[in-house]
């Protein structure tokens, strides 16, 4: 039986629907779509896995968010135990395999449950006591619209989209080299053979428009193109029914560009309408047994009926004691919030998924003030910061408790980002059949943490970012990113001094905090609140949300108190003025990922990619503490 284990958070990223992984026995599988994650059954209580995040539900246009199910043995469960033996289905992919002995290429069903063995009668392994296990081919084919299929072995070796060879017997042979040229596919029936050299490469179309195409699409058959067939094997579809039309590109199945998870994250902000509701009532209504009772009543309500406190008490039966300390008025006020449908705005979901500034503005306006709720606690530091800090940093907040939710809303292939706004298309890749009204959902998981929020002085920031020296320094970075964006189909964006300053400052502070209070850099994350203009956002949040217990005991919050934060900030700025790789690092015109950094390298400003929102791009120490040629250029040049 093909089965394996994976952490629940990994089923959101990086092993969500449509992603491939290799199990412990060496079998390559692809995670199936959302249609069968929660198989209907008598003992299914899907509400147990519900995540309440009203902003993400509205923003992404779905009715619910659910964490991937965990597996529970039913023989250990009690008689009233729900959600036993829930599994996330996977399919064996690539479907094509070859025998390590005879090298025969054969396809296998996607849903095969056991590791297949070679059935070739001419294989030398057949004379042994057992036939050898088949090994899956290392190549797949994909397109930028998210489709995936087996490499077209028949078509490639016969150089035709519709081969005339009736009974092909294919073999995958290798000459022992380390390149694609050493791999050859042979048809023993018609004695044709062809190497795999070039199948992963890109070229310009020979037609007048000169659009980008691939070697596989342009040269599989002479005189005709071989476009993507629209395959979606994670949904059980070997072809999409219609030709996709996009160029088809060969790839190693383990290449990093085969799957890029599109994850949207949010810091939970309490609803305005819930301020007058006792959080203890909300907590009681979301408890597993009461949530199940709510779901049971909701299923039998007629259109227009409202779930009342008395109905809920009767449905809860022996668990109604959890509601005894609350009045009917308190319960019904909380039910009005929990049971009210989320208005899914398709305009919002289409236009703002790719614009984090618009979505984060509500977080920005909330987290900069004091909040005391069940999921978010923000307080003002005790005491006062020195005058030189107050002139540059206008606000510091201690986030004693936060909950971050991360949702998978789609995925890309080939390119990490998409320059086109096709949000609905990306989300549709997650399931085979469109969800019925009121039943659309996306996989998500939550992590708890704490953090420090700081905001720069708008007056000082406006005067600094409009100087000619600051604008001129970022010209090479902006030009390089524009070139990379065109080449890699990235969404266009403006590289502003405010973005680079806040991003670099966040990295410097995280690196300093790892020395000051013992956090690993991978356990800290940044969250940038940046938008242009004199009234735009200019804040950053450094927080712990690593999915475990590290950093959730108040250590980071204590570093935000005046007597500690001042030392951290001064040390971070002082260390930023000199790098062990200077003057090479400071004088660089482009380094790091995509050459989109100036004075930033692994010795001074780079972080693990899990901690950075921008893939370690848009960093420059020169805008923080000044350069060797112009020490006064930095925003913090006179500080420290």
Image (tube, rainbow, N blue to C red):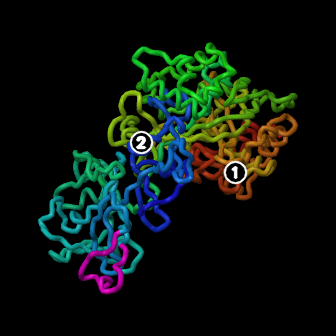
Question: Residue 559 placed where, x, y %?
Answer: 81, 40
Residue 521 image label: 1
Residue 105 quadrant: bottom left
* Of the pair 605 and 195, the residue shown nearer to us: 195
Badge 1 or badge 2: first in the primary sequence:
2
**Residue shown at 36% from the left, 64% from the top:** 139
| CA neighbours of label 2 inside 10 A, class few (<14), some (14 to 19), many (20+) | few
Q: Main secondary structure of the magenta part?
A: loop
> Which residue occupies the foreground of this view, 339 or 105?
339
**Residue, disc 2:** 41
Give the image location of residue 593, x and y in percent.
55, 52
Relative depth, front residue between 499 and 55 = 55
Measured along the vertical axis of the image, is residue 457 above or below residue 509? above
* Magenta stretch: includes residue 121: yes
Label 2 SS: loop
Q: Is residue 511 visible from the viewing direction of this image?
A: yes
Residue 533 horizontal side relative to residue 395, left or right:
left
Distance in Å between CA atoms under marks 1 and 2: 44 Å
In this picture, residue 258 sits left or right of residue 406: left
Query: Does the magenta-highlighted stretch encompass residue 110?
Result: no
Question: Position of 398 compared to 485: left or right?
Answer: right
Whether residue 480 is visible to the viewer of this picture, yes or no, is no
Highlighted magenta segment, given as a residue range: 116-133
Taking the spot 29% from the left edge, 50% from the top edge, the residue there is: 237
- Circle count: 2
Image quarter (top left, top right, bottom left or bottom right) of the N terminus: bottom left
Q: In the rendered view, does 221 fall on the left or right side of 67? A: left
Question: Which mark's residue is nearer the viewer, 1 or 2?
Answer: 2
Image: 508 above or below 268: below
Residue that appears at 41% across and 59% down = 29
Residue drawn at point x = 28 percent, y = 82 percent = 123
Locate the C terminus by quadrant.
top right
């Amino acid at each position: 039986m093909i089965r394996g284990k994976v952490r629940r958070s990994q089923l959101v990223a990086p092993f969500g629907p449509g992603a491939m992984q290799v199990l412990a026995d060496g079998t390559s599988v692809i995670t199936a779509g959302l249609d069968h994650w929660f198989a209907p059954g008598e003992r299914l209580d899907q509400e147990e896995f519900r995540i309440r995040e009203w902003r993400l539900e509205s923003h992404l246009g779905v009715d619910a968010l659910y964490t991937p199910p965990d597996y529970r043995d039913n023989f250990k469960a009690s008689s009233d135990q729900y959600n036993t033996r829930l599994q996330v289905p996977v399919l064996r992919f690539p479907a094509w395999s070859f025998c390590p002995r005879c090298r025969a290429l054969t396809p296998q069903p996607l849903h095969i449950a056991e590791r297949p063995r070679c059935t070739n009668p001419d294989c030398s392994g057949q004379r042994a006591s057992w036939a050898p296990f088949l090994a899956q081919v290392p190549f797949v084919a994909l397109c930028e619209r998210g489709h995936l299929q087996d490499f077209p072995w028949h078509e490639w070796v016969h150089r035709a989209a519709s081969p005339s060879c009736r009974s092909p017997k294919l073999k995958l042979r290798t000459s022992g080299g380390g390149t694609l040229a050493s791999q050859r596919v042979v048809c023993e029936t018609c004695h044709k053979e062809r190497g795999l050299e070039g199948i992963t490469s890109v070229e310009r179309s020979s037609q007048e428009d000169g659009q980008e195409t691939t070697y596989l699409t342009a040269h599989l058959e002479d005189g005709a193109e071989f476009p993507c067939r629209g395959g979606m094997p994670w949904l059980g579809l070997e072809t999409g029914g219609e030709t996709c039309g996009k160029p088809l590109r060969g790839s190693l199945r383990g290449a990093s560009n085969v799957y890029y998870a599109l994850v949207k994250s949010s810091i939970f902000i309490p609803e305005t309408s819930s301020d007058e509701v006792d959080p203890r009532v909300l907590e009681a209504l979301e408890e597993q047994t009461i949530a199940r009772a709510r779901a049971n009543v909701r299923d039998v309500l007629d259109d227009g009926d409202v779930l009342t406190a008395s109905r809920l008490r009767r449905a809860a039966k022996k668990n109604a004691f959890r509601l005894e300390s609350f009045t009917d008025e308190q319960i019904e006020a909380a039910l009005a919030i929990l049971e009210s449908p989320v208005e899914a705005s398709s305009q919002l979901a289409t236009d703002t998924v790719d614009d984090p500034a618009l979505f984060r503005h509500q977080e920005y306006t909330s987290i900069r003030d004091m909040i005391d709720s069940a999921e978010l606690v923000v307080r003002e530091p005790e005491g006062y910061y020195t005058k030189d800090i107050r002139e540059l940093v206008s606000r510091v907040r201690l986030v004693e408790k936060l909950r971050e939710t991360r949702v998978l809303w789609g995925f890309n292939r080939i390119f990490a980002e998409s320059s086109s706004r096709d949000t609905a298309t990306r989300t549709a890749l997650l399931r085979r059949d469109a969800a019925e009204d009121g039943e659309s959902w996306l996989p998500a998981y939550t992590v708890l943490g704490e953090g420090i929020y700081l905001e720069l002085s708008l007056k000082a920031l406006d005067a600094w970012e409009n100087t000619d020296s600051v604008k001129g320094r970022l010209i090479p970075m902006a030009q390089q990113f524009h070139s990379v964006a065109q080449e890699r189909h990235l969404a266009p964006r403006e590289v502003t001094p405010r973005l680079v300053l806040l991003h670099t400052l966040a990295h410097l502070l995280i690196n300093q905090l790892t020395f000051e209070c013992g956090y690993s850099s991978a356990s800290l994350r940044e969250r940038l609140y940046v938008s242009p203009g004199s009234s735009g956002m200019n804040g950053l949040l450094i927080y712990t949300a690593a999915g475990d217990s590290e950093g959730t005991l108040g250590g980071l919050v204590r570093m935000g108190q005046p007597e500690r934060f001042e030392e951290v900030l001064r040390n971070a700025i002082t260390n930023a003025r000199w790098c062990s790789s200077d003057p090479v690092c400071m004088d660089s015109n482009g380094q790091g990922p995509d050459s989109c950094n100036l004075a930033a390298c692994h010795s001074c400003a780079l972080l693990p990619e899990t901690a950075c929102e921008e893939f370690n791009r848009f960093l420059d120490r020169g805008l923080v503490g000044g350069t060797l040629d112009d020490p006064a250029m930095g925003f913090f040049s006179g500080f420290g």
